[in-house]
Image (spheres, helix red, strand yellow):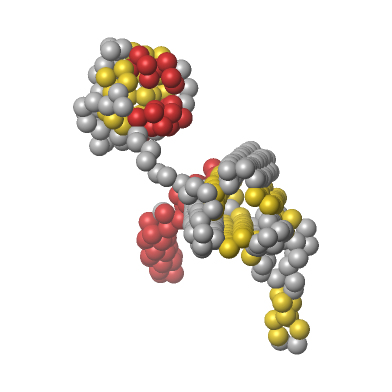
Amino acid sequence: MKFTLREIAKIVGGELIGDPNIVITGISGIKEAKEGDITFLANPKYFHLMKVTKASAIIVSKEITDTNKPLIRTDNPSLAFAKVVSLVAPNDVKHPQGIHPTAVIAKSAKLGKNVSVGAYTIIEEEVEIGDNSIIYGSCYIGHHTKIGKDCLIYPHVSIRERIEIASRVIIHSGAVIGSDGFGFATVKGVREKIPQIGTVVIEDDVEIGANVTIDRARFDKTIIGKGTKIDNLVQIAHNVIIGENCIIVAQAGISGSTSLGEGVILAGQAGVVGHITIGEGSIVAAQAGVTKSVPPHTKVSGYPAKPHDVAKRVNACVQRLPQLYKKIKELEAKVAELEKVLQKK
């Protein structure tokens, strides 16, 4: 498909600087772009690439004006570029349609209008699936589970019994929803399993990445709030409550009965102990280990996690330890020499 810069600027609601009649035929990253492509710049550290990219135009933030290329200035370059991608990029992916003859669907299951079920998927007793939802092949949906409208569930997803999933939820391959929480009691040196009889509630517009595991609650609910996005390989333990519009990045782990407020960001490989609260709007940096509750709108990093400014100062001191050690050894030698001189007197 082809669009002029004038048309693209109108679609994304941006301010055009440059020739409005330039024709865009493709999209690409700023390093890989060639003539005819449109690209975007959201991170200021890549500003120098604007001077050398071969792209015919760049979508940028409104603060940027100096360039040798036509610009479309917007409030959110990433979001604007996403809109362009949906226009220009080919979308030839075809989701399953209808009910595949090899799907195993219990007689008591209730499927809404235009529901699609792929090959070898198993849908157990009393399951309810809302209109227009798509279940790919080789999935398992346990009894009494409810799935809302317009959901998209990719292959090899396991959704256990009595799980509640709202509308427009996307679950990627390999995810397991509702596995038993990790609960054991030690009796005379033996680990005895504690029954996990709660459920998982996933609210509207949540996206769950590949190979994510979300454990059912021991008695009540593990909750994933509306609009939250979960990256691949994340572990969410029993009775965790995640607020609305959170971001949980790959390989993060959240221990049982911890609560995250609205808009929290857990960066990659962050680890959170159980029974604490991370306040709304807080950011936990990559590989941080959170051992106590975090106040709202706080950024923490390091292990144990502490306010980011403090963590940076601590890290700076740690990096200087070799020099400090050398300096101390030199001072010790000088002190020893002075002691010898004083002893002679």
Give left or right: position of 267 versus 181.
left
Q: Is residue 25 above or below residue 173?
A: above
Q: Give the tally of numbered discs.
A: 0
Identify the residue at horizontal 47%, vertical 26% (top origin). 76
Locate the C terminus and report the quarter of the image it occupies.
Answer: bottom left
Q: Where's residue 165, x and y in %? A: 66, 49
Identify the residue at horizontal 70%, vertical 71% (top origin). 183
Q: Is residue 343 above or below residue 311?
A: below
Identify the residue at horizontal 41%, vertical 67% (top origin). 336
Q: Where's residue 109, x and y in %? A: 68, 56
Identify the residue at horizontal 31%, vertical 35% (top origin). 29
Q: Is residue 124 above or below residue 97?
A: below
Foreground pick, 320 / 54: 54
Q: Where's residue 156, x and y in %? A: 50, 61
Locate the N terminus and report the quarter of the image it occupies.
Answer: top left
Foreground pick, 148 / 59: 148
Q: Where's residue 216, x and y in %? A: 69, 61
Question: Most extreme residue toward the bottom, as rendered?
Answer: 188
Give left or right: position of 217 versus 103.
right
Foreground pick, 237 / 160: 160
Q: Is residue 257 visible?
A: no
Foreground pick, 241 / 12: 12
Q: Quadrant of residue 133?
A: top right
Q: Is residue 59 visible?
A: yes
Q: Quadrant of residue 265?
A: top right
Q: Is residue 120 above or below residue 195?
A: above
